[in-house]
Amino acid sequence: MNKKIKVVFFDSSHSYYAIDESLIENGRISCRGKKDPTNLGIRKLSSVGKFFGKYFPEYDSNYWLTYKGLEFANKEVFDEIKSANFKGIGAPRAELFFPMLFDKIDPNVFQDKRQLFSEFWDFKRENSAFLGTQFHLNQEKKHEKNGFIINPFTEEKFKLITHNKIFDNESVVYNLKDLEDGAYSEILLFDLEVGVAGQVDELFVKTIKKKKNIWINDSKTNEEKPDKSNMQKAYPPLDELDNCKHNKYSMQLSSYAYILERAGCVIQDLAYTFYKDYNEECYETVKVEYLRDFCEKIFQKV
């Protein structure tokens, strides 16, 4: 007898697990009476973000904390040395004039400013995560109240498909090609063969010529519009892409699309909607290219 596998999401750790549905009893996962837990078939899945994110250089926090610590320790000296010695050279080369600044800036003031800026960053990150969660919850509530979502690509109203949830989020079908026609909010996608899962803000499904056609739109809440270029490149096999937010969003959406394509769906359009400062009235929908070839390369590496 084939096991029915459900994928569940725990928000507290932002973790995805594939489990045998028979383990779910009375609204919880029960392992009671199981002598060998290694035979239960519980498997942790990678998030889509981590899956493709390892191919993009990580944010160099140590460099930027030093940069900002020096800048705020003495803004006048910082600007003077930077403009006099490195005019026209961007911030990625700024470490070249750090030694000049250390000679002219009080080290105690620098350390204080560096620590304070680090704490500010921590707060900003936590606050952004909180505001982002609240924004998405409000979006979900609005969709549930309306009973539909408008497809931004076709302007059609798609009936909202809802399901009762036991966990923070969970898969709604065993095979993604069995999704019924309509719109889904915060739907969980997965590929058990590759071991990856993620959540899409808005997914639109419509059967055309017996094929499930797909449109994907994700919400992004940033202070500034996502950048589309950078001097730094991603790592192979994505090294043709600049290390910028737009390309990261494009790879995220393309990974969702590729998961659905591998399940037998037909991909139509992908986009993210940028809401400036979490303002639902100030937004722009940005269509992105389906980076299928890049997805194929990283999925094949698993």
Image: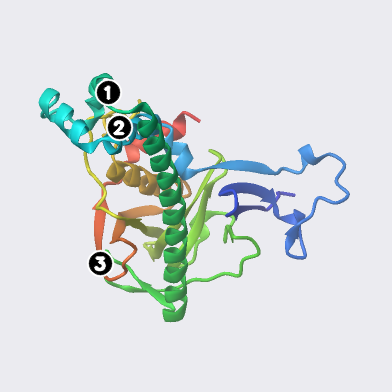
Q: Earlier in the sequence, mark 2 or mark 1?
A: 2
Looking at the image, can residue 210 be seen? no
Which quadrant of the figure has residue 37?
A: top right
Residue at image position (32%, 46%) is 250
Residue at image position (41%, 47%) is 120
* Label 3 secondary element: loop
Circle on res. 25: none
Q: Are marks 3 and 2 in contact (CB under 8 Å)?
A: no
Q: Position of residue 62 (x, y in %)?
A: 39, 30
Q: Which residue is mark 3?
A: 282
Q: Which residue is mark 2?
A: 70
Relative horizontal placement of residue 82, taking residue 203 as reference (left or right): left
Q: Is residue 68 above or below residue 89?
A: below
Q: Position of residue 177 (x, y in %)?
A: 49, 56
Q: Nearer the viewer, residue 64 or 10?
A: 64
Which quadrant of the figure has residue 74?
A: top left
Q: Which amino acid type is shown beneath numbered disc 3?
A: Cys
Label 3, label 2: how far apart the Cα atoms are: 35 Å
Look at discs 3 and 1 and give the one toward the viewer.
Answer: 1
Q: Are marks 3 and 1 in contact (CB under 8 Å)?
A: no
Q: Earlier in the sequence, mark 3 or mark 2?
A: 2
